[in-house]
Image (cartoon, helix red, strand yellow):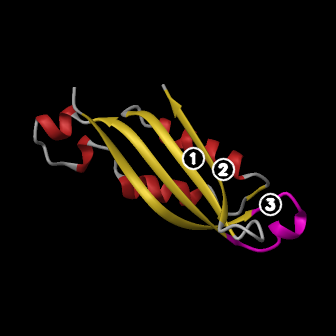
Amino acid sequence: MSNATIAIDGLRVLARVGVPEFERRQLQPLDIDVELDVELDEAAILERDSIASTVDYAAVQDSIAELFVDTEHRLIERIALRIAQLCLGDSRVERVRVNVCKPDALPDARNARVSLERGR
């Protein structure tokens, strides 16, 4: 079995997020990192060299972006969990690691971050 990690680093999305209502009134940037552990026998060993043989990271990016269309979230913890669930919807993904960073959430820190890992 050939395992690999597919990663999307620093995906910037705009979201209505925050516990206080005033935070959700405007779009705020979030930075998202996703790592997908996948089994790549079909893509790597059989040398198909076809996007159909692997997880399409562009499609994952688009699906993550869709989570923020016309929605608001209170917690970045919930966002991280929703992203993990979305990624595990692809049966080729065995494990997912998600970081969601909210820049400038704290006055004395670069960002606040939630990290989680889920698997089958």
Camera-nearest residue between 91 and 80: 80
| Magenta residue span | 17-28
Give the vertical position of 5 relative to 94 (above or below). Answer: below
Camera-nearest label, 1 or 3:
3
Question: Is label 2 in contact with label 1 (beta carbons under 8 Å)?
Answer: yes
Residue 71 to residue 42: above or below: below
In the image as oriented, which residue stretches furthest toward the front?
Answer: 108
Residue 68, placed above or below residue 120: below
Left or right, 60 with respect to 27, comes to left
Is residue 89 at all visible to an observer of this figure?
no
Residue 1 seen anywhere in this rendered image of the structure: yes
Q: Residue at x 44, y 59 (%)?
A: 9
Q: Residue furthest bottom?
A: 26
**Which residue is found at the position 54% from the left and 58% from the top?**
32
Q: Residues within 10 Å of mark 1 (few under 14, many from 20)?
A: many
| Residue plotted at (75% across, 69% down) | 108
**Residue on which the image places disc 2:** 79
Q: Residue at x 54, y 37 (%)?
A: 117
Dot 1 or dot 3: first in sequence order is: 3
Q: Residue furthest right?
A: 21
Residue 102 pos. (x, y %): 67, 63
Q: What whole-number distance in Å separates the C-alpha atoms at marks 2 and 1?
A: 6 Å
Helix, strand or loop status at disc 1 = helix
Q: Reading the chain from its start, which is encountered first: label 3 or label 2?
A: 3
- In terms of image quadrants, where is residue 104? bottom right
Decide: few, some or many residues near mark 3? Use Cα within 10 Å; few <14, some 14-19, many ≥20: some
Q: Which mark is residue 83?
A: 1
> Hey, what amino acid is under mark 2?
Ile
The amino acid on which the numbered mark 1 sits, given as a three-letter code, is Ile
Q: Position of residue 53 (x, y in %)?
A: 24, 41
Residue 109 versus residue 36: which sits nearer the camera?
109
Q: Which residue is mark 3?
A: 18
